[in-house]
């Protein structure tokens, strides 16, 4: 994704190992390798988690907001370093300082922000946050480690 600031769903599918129902990115709006990413997730009533979370009051689970942020930082990591093998992935290794500020509900457009803070010996640290309509809904520090799938 070098020198590319936009990625549609086809590009995301080429980069990420995730598939339905666990792919939580719809588009990359901006990505500067080695620096930051801005991506989006359209939240619809058709999400598979809404019937059980919560019946009559659908709210996107916080852990899935964190997962969407992690997937966005995975795209940033792939854009920053050339993948050496098709089975190479970034595994979520840690989550610190998580704060949820307001619920995410059907109809919201979740804007995901990630900034690469540090990369050392195969471990990456990102500061992330998610917004809806310009309002902060969640933030977290994420760590990821390079590994092999399978």
Image (spheres, grey):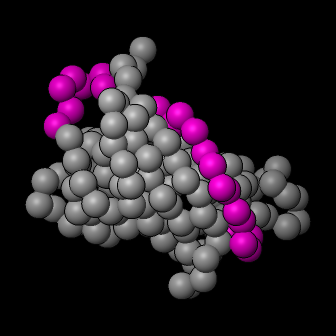
Q: Quadrant of residue 31?
A: bottom left
**Which residue appears farthest toward the left when viewing the image?**
3
Vertical position of residue 16 compared to residue 45: above or below:
above
Residue 94 painted magenta: yes
Percent of width and height locating residue 26: 41, 60
Observer-nearest of 134 and 18: 134
Q: Residue at position x 63%, y 49% from top? A: 96
Say whether residue 75 is visible: no
User: Is 10 left or right of 66, judged from the image as shown?
Assistant: left
Say which residue appears at 73% left-offset and 74% top-offset: 102
Foreground of the two, 54 or 134: 134
Whether 56 is drawn above or below 83: the answer is below
Quadrant in the picture for the C terminus: top left
What x and y, as percent, mark residue 15? 28, 42
Give yes or no for residue 65 being in the magenta stretch: no
Residue drawn 48% across the image and 71% down it: 111
Count the marks: how many? 0
Q: What stretch is highlighted in magenta?
A: 82-105
* Residue found at the very far top of the displayed protein: 150
Q: Where is residue 104 in the image (x, y as percent from the top left)?
A: 68, 69
Residue 58 shows up from this direction: yes
- Asked whether, in this view, residue 14 is left or right of residue 116, the answer is left
**In the orientation shown, which residue stands out farthest toward the bottom?**
134
For image coordinates 71% across by 65% down, the residue present is 100
Position of 119 relative to 45 (above/below): above
Q: Is residue 147 left or right of residue 136?
A: left
């Amino acid at each position: 994704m070098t020198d590319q600031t936009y990625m549609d769903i086809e590009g995301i599918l080429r980069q990420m190992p995730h598939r339905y129902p666990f792919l939580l990115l719809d588009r990359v709006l901006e990505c500067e390798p080695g620096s930051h990413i801005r991506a989006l997730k359209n939240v619809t009533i058709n999400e598979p988690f809404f019937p059980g979370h919560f019946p009559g009051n659908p709210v996107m689970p916080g852990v899935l907001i964190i997962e969407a942020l992690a997937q966005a930082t995975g795209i940033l990591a792939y854009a920053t370093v050339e993948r050496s093998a098709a089975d190479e992935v970034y595994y979520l290794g840690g989550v610190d300082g998580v704060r949820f500020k307001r619920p995410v509900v059907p109809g919201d457009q979740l804007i995901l922000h990630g900034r690469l803070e540090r990369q050392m010996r195969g471990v990456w640290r990102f500061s992330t946050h998610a917004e809806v309509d310009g309002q902060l809904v969640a933030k977290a520090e994420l760590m990821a480690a390079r590994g092999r799938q399978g």
